[in-house]
Structure formats: structure tokens, C-alpha cells
Amino acid sequence: MTRRMTPLELMTKLISFPTVSRDTNLPLVDWVEGYLNDHGISAHRYYHPEEPKAALYAHVGPEVEGAIVLSGHTDVVPVDGQPWDTDPFVVTEKDGKYFGRGTCDMKGFDALALWALVEAHYARVKTPLQLALSFDEEIGCLGAPPMIKAMQGVVPKGGPVIVGEPSMMKAVTGHKGGQGFDTHVVGFEVHSSLLPQGVSAILEGAKIIDFANQRNAENMAAEPSTLAAMFDPPFTTWHVGQVHGGTAHNITAKDCHFAMDFRAVPGDDLVALKEGYLAHVAEIEKGMKAIHPETRVEIETRFDVPPLKPEEDGEAEGLARAITGDNGTHVVSYGTEAGQFQAAGYSAVVCGPGDIAQAHQPNEFITVAQFEAGHAFMRDLVARLA
């Protein structure tokens, strides 16, 4: 019989695959599928339509609906330019911590979920358990929606979903949603001394970017709803993090590229927020075309992540609280795949080991104590299912 690996051995193996979002994750998926097959568990894949990436999902236990779903992502953020003290793709234990890219976000949880799936298989659980590992979470939660769709009819429809993003093993029942828009302003070049005859993509882009300042000021001044007041900050925020464009200091800029993003509190209308931005862009574009008809603004949606809304008597929340004993109220301002599972009809909660403050950092780590807390959670879960 193939030996069952420990959670630490599994995390060490998963982290050895440098699955940065820009690169393939197929070697990791191949290994996980092989490991499951060695233990008599069938796995299924959803392939990215254009890139060498795949999501993987599997079901153990009775072939009935209502499985507990353990959800994680396989991709990690880059380590380029970060001052690491150890090899980021080798788990290093030091001072009560496991260091390595993904220990916290979120291959630590992936390893625990993989361990639980195999243990549940051998325990012949009476309530089924599923594993769902996505790709491209770190660049906008792009991989989960097609994976969720692909799961339907291949494995029985799951019930409560536990998304294991680092929450210090607290039951997070709400998070912000968001959308991102790649914005390309196309101007008309002239010598800068003839400014009125040209259209500067940068100056027009600045007018569009100011939309973020206007909305943030309005939202900050408004009285937050009861639900919004749970978040920090308690309002929807707009942000531009990078701007690129221009050719020379004495030429009106032909191009200006930036990404306009918002993070919305649950209850705000994401469609209306997007339409408000597009209306502002259209107004700026109208003024540009009045000067030169070839100018334009091109918009492409980069990501679209629905919020996680607190559920009344939520099944996933109840399960997480029953195992952890946590009865506090916890919401976060970052987005996760939990909102996407919820939008697809699942009950969802965020509950995983580690501190989000360590995510994406050089010398990323998860404490040994938090990893062990996650292991205890999985042992309890498997026992309940059995």
C-alpha cells in the first residue's frame, strides 16, 4: 500500500513546485493526481483554454450530494526582487515557523485538505468530502468560476464550502467583492507647444483616474450601512496602482495605460459601480473625440470577484464554528473564491491557518502552531464525516 504522507510532507512537496501565476501549474497537478490515484481516488481536471494550467477536483465517500468542499488555489505570487533569507521553494523550519512561498497563502491549507481527503477515503466516511484546487487566484480569482462550472455533473453537487485562505482559523463570513478594468487611453500626438491641437492620453487619463478620488471622498463621507460598518474601511474603495504612457516630455502622449479597480462592500451594486465608471469614461472620451475623432478609450475587464455575504444560519459557517469553537464576527476587505462559490449556490465560509499579513511577503511563513491548528481542524472534520 502506498504510504500516506503527513501534512508537513505534503506541504513540502507542494511548495517545491514554483507555481507562480505567470507559469504553469501542471507539474503540481500531475503529482497531486498521481498521489490520489495511488490511494484509489479518482481526480478530475479543468484545463485553462489557452495556457498550460489546470484546476483539479476530487470526491470521496458516498456518491451523493452535500459533500463538504475544501477549496484552495495552487498558484502563488512571484518572489522576484524580494530579499528572502531561505530558498522560497523549500520549506524551512526555524523559530517555530515554516518558511516558504505559499506556506501561508495557501499551500499550507492545500496540503491539509489533501491529507484530509485521503484520510476520509480510508475512513470510509458516511458524508462525502471534496477537494477543489484552482489556478490564477492571485491574478483576480480567474480560475474558480470555470472550475466550479466544470464540477457540476462530474462529481455530485457539494454543500458547504470551506475556503482555506489564512484567517487564523477564524470563521470569516464576509468579504468585499471587486472588479478591475484595464484602461487604455489613446490620444493624438503633436508637439507639446501645440497642445490644444493634440490630445494627451496622459492628461485625459488623469481625468479618468480622478474618478477614484471623487468616489473615495464621497464614500468616506457617507454614513455606512450596518453591513458596511463591519469592514475596514467601511466603504467601497477605488484605486489605481500603476500608470504607464508617453513617449517624450515634449510630445503629447499617444498612449496611457492603467488599471482601475474597486473593492466593494457587500450590499453595493457591482453592476452599478461598473456602469458609473464606464459613464465617466464615456464623458471624457466624448471630449477627446471633439478634438480628434481617432482618439478613444478602450476598457477590458481584468477580474470580477463577487463579495461574500454573511449567510443567515449558513451551513458552512456553522460547520467551521462547530469545529473551531469560534463564535466571533469576522469580515475581511480582500476578496476570495468564497464569494464565487456562494454566487454559484454553495454555502461558503473562509477558514484557514495562518495570518494574511504574511501573504505575499518575503520570508513568508506559517507558524507551526497555526499549521497544527489546521491539522486538528481536519482531523475533527474527518471524524465528523465518518
Image: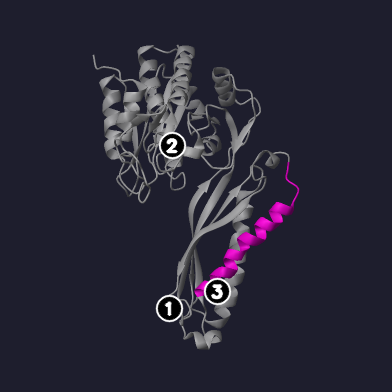
Picture quadrant of residue 156: top left
Badge 2: residue crowd in 10 Å (few <14, some 14–19, many ≥20): many
Q: Return the x and y of residue 232 as percentages of the image width and height.
A: 64, 43
The CA distance from mark 3 to mark 1 is 14 Å
Q: Return the x and y of residue 148 as percentages of the image width and height.
A: 45, 36
Magenta stretch encompasses residue 52: no
Magenta stretch encompasses residue 220: yes
Q: Main secondary structure of the magenta part?
A: helix
Reading the image, the residue beneath label 2 is 105
Direction left: furthest residue: 1
Q: Identity of the amino acid at label 2?
A: Asp
Badge 3: residue crowd in 10 Å (few <14, some 14–19, many ≥20): some
Reading the image, the residue beneath label 3 is 203
The CA distance from mark 2 to mark 1 is 41 Å
The magenta span reads 201-225
Per the rendering, the mark at residue 195 is none
In this view, the residue in front, 285 or 257, is 257
Per the rendering, the mark at residue 248 is 1
| SS assignment at label 3 | helix
CB atoms at circles 3 and 2 under 8 Å apart? no
Direction front: furthest residue: 95
Q: Earlier in the sequence, mark 3 or mark 2?
A: 2
Quarter placement of the N terminus: top left
